[in-house]
Image (cartoon, rainbow, N blue to C red):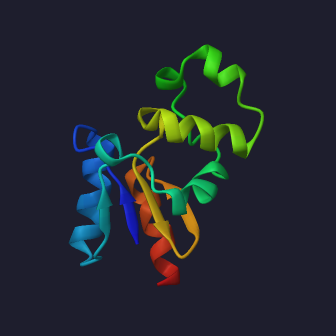
Amino acid sequence: MRFYHNPRCSKSRQALALLEERGVEVEVIRYLETGVLEDDLNILAQLENVVRKKEAGPEAMAGLQGPDDIITLLRSHPKALERPILVVNGEAVIGRPPENVLTLLKNE
């Protein structure tokens, strides 16, 4: 399990706390420092609203025609990734609201 985390984001901190309260061990990915893992790009590119419009900007948003464009954007501009995101067994969910991350735990 990987958790894409921005410690400055309250929703990200809340989602991580929910996981920790349940004793769930996750690999915390501080994507602003490390970027998005290549193994996760295809999974993340399938998520609706995975790109933060404000961070990407209107020009980049207008150029997003599909998953390949999203992957290219997230590789070069990880700050545009919505957060938090939990990735489990090839599935991902955006933690907005934070409780959304718990939906993937049912499969564990």
**To which quarter of the image does residue 15 belong?**
bottom left
View extreme (right): residue = 65
**Residue under the point 53% across and 24% down:** 56
View extreme (top): residue = 59
**To which quarter of the image does residue 8 belong?**
top left
Residue 50 position, x and y percent, is 56, 42
| Residue 2 versus residue 33 in the image, above or below | below
Residue 37 position, x and y percent, is 45, 56
Residue 59 position, x and y percent, is 64, 15
Q: Is residue 89 left or right of residue 35?
A: right
**Residue under the point 45% across and 76% down:** 105
Residue 26 position, x and y percent, is 31, 70
| Residue 80 versus residue 59 in the image, above or below | below
Residue situated in front as seen by the camera: 97 or 70 = 70
Residue situated in front as seen by the camera: 41 or 89 = 41
Q: Is residue 83 left or right of residue 19?
A: right
Residue situated in front as seen by the camera: 59 or 17 = 59
| Residue 93 versus residue 1 in the image, above or below | above
- The N terminus, quarter of image: bottom left
Q: Is residue 31 left or right of residue 91?
A: left
**Residue under the point 39% across and 66% down:** 2
Number of numbered discs on residues: 0
**Residue under the point 55% across and 25% down:** 53
